[in-house]
Image: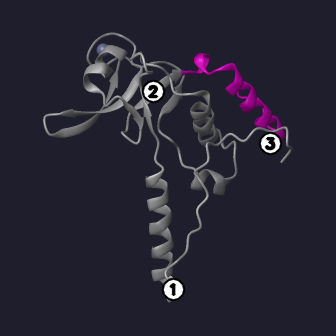
Amino acid sequence: MDADVPDPLLRLPDEQIAAAPGLSGDDLLEDVFTQVYDHVNLHAMAWPAADRDGNLVPPPGAHVLHDLAHVHDLAGEEDLMVNPRLGTVAVVPDLPECDFCYLPARYDARITIGERRVGANLCGDHYRVKGSGTLGASGDAYLMLRSEVPESVRLACNKIRAAQSEDPLF
Ligand SMILES: [Zn+2]
């Protein structure tokens, strides 16, 4: 790829996968798969939903670009597979309504009702009360409108799309 084309992925650290000696066939595959699975989980993203002053804030542009890369195939299949979605942010055309009031929901969150874990759309105030406060591995994601995608992310997307001979996304 052109050096001018941005890398859309927040990459996991490289790690050598070494299968246990003496394995073959399905046992070997199973061993390698388990190691890859553990590696991905070990580095699963847990991103604070609030800044140091306690204000709820969107995740950084790099998270937005990483997610858009998955949605729009902005990277190769293998790269996407070994650098899975972070789950911290989702770009949406409209914000759904909060499940607990009439305000627009900023979060697609996992909450506990009774003894059950369920998905819920939450506005900021209800996220503070019911959400985990952590985005990503928790199952909570910030909902970002297309119109709110930062300029730097739009530019990066469009450069990659141009290199792919595709129409710009923004
Ligand atoms: Zn609400």
The answer to which quarter of the image holds residue 138 is top left
The answer to which quarter of the image holds residue 166 is top right
Residue 5 drawn at (x, y percent): 81, 39
Element on which disc 3 rests: loop
Assign ligand 1 to one image quadrant: top left
Residue placed at 42% from the left, 30% from the top?
48
Asked if disc 2 and disc 1 are in contact, CB closer than 8 Å, the reply is no
Q: Is residue 36 above or below residue 148?
A: below
Task: Tell me which label, 3 or 2, sits earlier in the chain.
Answer: 2
Q: Is residue 17 above or below residue 87?
A: below
Label 1 sits on what residue type?
Answer: Pro
Residue placed at 26% from the left, 17% from the top?
100
Pointer 1 local density, CA inside 10 Å: few below 14, some 14–19, many at least 20 = few
Residue 163 in sight from this viewpoint: yes
Q: Is residue 166 magenta?
A: yes
In three-dimensional space, the C-alpha distance between marks 2 and 1, rounded to whole angstroms, equals 44 Å
Q: Which residues are magenta?
A: 145-170
Element on which disc 2 rests: strand
Residue at mark 3: 164
State left or right for residue 141 relative to residue 2.
left
Residue 102 drawn at (x, y percent): 32, 10
Residue 155 drawn at (x, y percent): 75, 26
State left or right for residue 48 relative to residue 146.
left
Residue 170 in sight from this viewpoint: no
Q: Which mark is residue 21?
A: 1
Residue at mark 2: 142
Task: From the image, state whether disc 3 or disc 2 is nearer to you.
Answer: 2
Residue 41 drawn at (x, y percent): 44, 54
Task: From the image, state whether disc 3 or disc 1 is nearer to you.
Answer: 1
Element on which disc 1 rests: loop
Beta carbon of the mark 3 residue lies under 8 A of ligand 1: no
Label 3 sits on what residue type?
Answer: Gln
